[in-house]
Image (cartoon, rainbow, N blue to C red):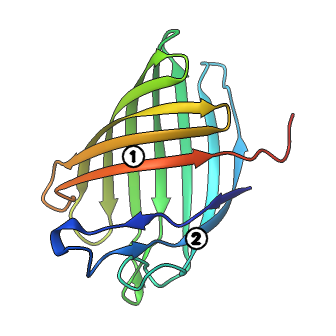
């Protein structure tokens, strides 16, 4: 099971509002399918977000999504990864079916520290494609905790101009194999 707690979005261009606030809570399930014979790790994630966030950030609807993340070690220090996704976000009173694909290269710098560069493309049913170049770094504090810093820049007119993010993540594993 997966729980996604709300993140906080702060709109710098308006000094915090409109468009700032907490996002939505989401609940989902993940099933590990691989590694496959080609040494690809593959899983499937199905989730539903609930309209719990700020009015200016939340879609206001119950939004399902399906993700298929994959990864493959290229060497002891390099990994290629990505994800194919389909989202059904609420926009107004309709759904804007959106496909997304990502491709990422990750470099392990030291045992607990890595850096990545990623391309992400969103392809909504309505509106133009959003292309993004994203890079960052993560430091694993423990096996179940990490902090990260990342930046991104939009590559198409429909994408955000730029983004900056910091984060803290932790994992609680209820079932061990």
Q: Secondary structure under badge 2?
A: strand
Q: Could you say where residue 106 lies in the image, as x and y percent from the top left? A: 42, 25
Q: Residues within 10 Å of mark 1 (few under 14, many from 20)?
A: some
Depth check, mark 2 against mark 1: the one in front is 2
Residue hosting label 2: 25
Q: Could you say where residue 143 lies in the image, as x and y percent from the top left? A: 67, 31
Q: Residue furthest left?
A: 157
In primary-sequence order, the first of circles 2 and 1 is: 2
Relative depth, front residue between 62 and 113: 113
Q: Secondary structure under badge 1?
A: strand
Q: Quadrant of residue 22?
A: bottom left
Residue hosting label 1: 101
Q: Quadrant of residue 34?
A: top right
Image height check: is 56 above or below 155? Answer: below
Q: Could you say where residue 156 lies in the image, as x and y percent from the top left? A: 15, 53
Position of residue 174 in the picture relative to residue 13 (left or right): right
Relative depth, front residue between 68 and 109: 109
């Amino acid at each position: 099971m997966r729980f996604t707690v709300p993140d906080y979005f702060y709109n710098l261009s308006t000094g915090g509002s409109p468009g700032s606030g907490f996002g939505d809570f989401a609940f989902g399930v993940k099933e590990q399918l691989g590694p496959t014979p080609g040494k690809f790790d593959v899983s499937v994630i199905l989730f539903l977000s609930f309209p719990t966030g700020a009015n200016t950030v939340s879609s206001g609807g119950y939004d399902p999504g399906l993700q298929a993340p994959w990864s493959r070690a290229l060497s002891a220090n390099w990994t290629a990864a990505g994800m194919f996704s389909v989202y059904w976000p609420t926009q107004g009173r309709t759904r804007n079916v959106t496909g997304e694909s990502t491709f990422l290269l990750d470099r392990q710098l030291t045992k607990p520290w890595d850096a990545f560069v990623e391309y992400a493309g969103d392809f909504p049913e309505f509106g133009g494609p959003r292309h993004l170049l994203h890079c960052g770094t993560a430091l694993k504090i423990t096996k179940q905790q990490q902090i990260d810093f990342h930046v991104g820049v939009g590559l198409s007119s429909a994408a955000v101009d730029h983004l900056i993010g910091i984060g803290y993540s932790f994992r609680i594993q209820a079932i061990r194999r």
